[in-house]
Image (cartoon, rainbow, N blue to C red):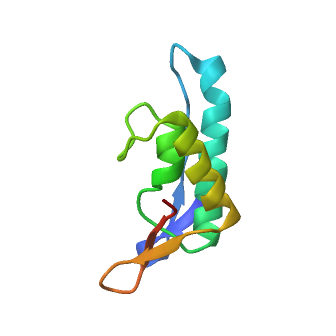
Amino acid sequence: MEGRIFGDIPIDLELRLSVEDSPNSGGSTIDAIRVCKLALDKGIAGPLIEISAYTMKHPPVQYPDEEARELLERFIRGEGEVIEDSWGERRGVITG
């Protein structure tokens, strides 16, 4: 992935996934990347609770699998309330 950071400095990001359970992790990783892109397109930054709860072993907020899936589907559909920080930046979405 290529882009630019503060000061218009170019950045190049390479990522490699290496885990014991990598065949099963590929789908979860792709789902997480797709939801990150969706959040980026919506101007949302910060922790993405819904995808973290659905795909990660130690998310910031733990939900049962069924509830995490429902929260994620609502996030993808665009349902929920956007959280803004004190500078007016979009920082996340409450779907629960």
Q: Quadrant of residue 46?
A: bottom left
Residue 1 appearing in the image: no
Task: Report the residue at 53% width, 44% height from top.
Answer: 68
Task: Report the residue at 47% width, 56% height from top.
Answer: 48
Question: Residue 20 at x, y = what percent?
Answer: 51, 13
Q: Is residue 91 left or right of residue 55?
A: left
Task: Report the residue at 39% width, 86% height from top.
Answer: 88
Question: Residue 86 at x, y = what percent?
Answer: 29, 84
Q: Which sits in the foreground, 14 or 92? A: 92
Q: Quadrant of residue 24?
A: top right
Relative vertical location of residue 45 with respect to residue 74 in this rendering, above or below: below
Q: Which sits in the foreground, 73 or 6? A: 73
Judged from this view, the residue extending furthest toward the top is 20
The tally of labels here is 0
Q: Is residue 64 left or right of residue 40?
A: left
Relative vertical location of residue 61 with respect to residue 46 in this rendering, above or below: above
Question: Residue 66 at x, y = what percent?
Answer: 57, 38
Residue 95 appearing in the image: yes
Question: Residue 80 at x, y = what percent?
Answer: 55, 69
Q: Is residue 62 left or right of residue 50?
A: left
Q: Is residue 47 left or right of residue 25?
A: left
Task: Report the residue at 56% width, 74% height from top.
Answer: 43
Q: Which sits in the foreground, 94 or 84? A: 94
